[in-house]
Image (spheres, rainbow, N blue to C red):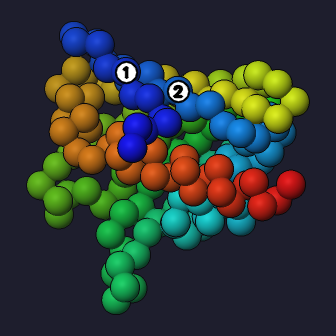
Amino acid sequence: MERKTKVHAEDGRQEIIITREFDLPLELLFKAYEEPEIFAQWMGTKVLKLESRKHGVYQFETSDTQGNVVFRANGVFPEFVRNEKITRTFEMENTSGSGMQFAVQLEFLEFEKLTDQTSKLTMQIVYKSIELRDQMLQMPFAQGLNMAHNRLQEVVKNLK
């Protein structure tokens, strides 16, 4: 099955461009990134903090079945314009045990209305180096993001 979430990584660049069209009105797509309860559902993570505003902060974590935290991330929102764009930093906190190190990345999310019932998300993720970007691409990053976006579509569709 073809992935609906497209990941484009140009050789020699420190960025990844991600695009996805959703069968959701723009306002509902944006709400999936703005509302902690909805975000937790489609991301499959526990939202510890989500201050959806300019200069707000966020933190979330994912645990295994035994309750051990396997992933924790945090960041700030230098820019937050409802139904238009979110600029955020993204930092993985507990990666030292994995043998992999990730620097803080900068993410630009743009939300676009296509029709009254469809919308598009474009994400530009900028990494500190080409090597760090390539390291991320070696992980099942694209597959995981596509699965998360599929869940977003299903969870938010039920809010209509």
Q: Is residue 6 above or below residue 136?
A: above
- Is 1 on the left or on the right of 14, as rendered? right
Task: Compare residues 148 and 22 and report the one nearer the observer.
Answer: 22
Q: Amino acid at mark 2?
A: Thr
Task: Compare residues 151 and 1 and report the one nearer the observer.
Answer: 1
- Is 84 on the left or on the right of 50, as rendered? right
What residue lies at 65% left-to-right and 50% top-to-bottom? Answer: 153
Q: Is residue 84 above or below residue 74?
A: above
Task: Compare residues 101 and 119 and report the one nearer the observer.
Answer: 119
Task: Give neighbour class at mark 1: few <14, some 14-19, many 20+ (Cα, 10 Å).
Answer: few
Residue denoted by label 2? 19
What residue lies at 61% left-to-right and 64% top-to-bottom? Answer: 40
Q: Position of residue 141 (x, y in %)?
A: 32, 44
Residue 120, quarter of picture: top right
Secondary-structure class at tag 1: strand
- Is 10 on the left or on the right of 26, as rendered? left
Q: Residue furthest bottom?
A: 66
Q: Position of residue 159 (x, y in %)?
A: 82, 59
| Cα–Cα span, label 2 and label 1 | 8 Å
Q: Amino acid at mark 1?
A: His
Residue 48, quarter of picture: bottom right
| Residue 98 visible in the shown view | yes
Residue denoted by label 1? 8
Q: Position of residue 14 (x, y in %)?
A: 31, 18
Secondary-structure class at tag 2: strand
What residue lies at 71% left-to-right and 65% top-to-bottom? Answer: 37
- Is 110 on the left or on the right of 13, as rendered? right
Q: Is residue 108 above or below residue 55?
A: above
Say whether disc 2 or disc 1 marks the residue closer to the N-terminus: 1
Circle 2/circle 1 CB separation < 8 Å: yes
Task: Compare residues 27 and 124 and report the one nearer the observer.
Answer: 27
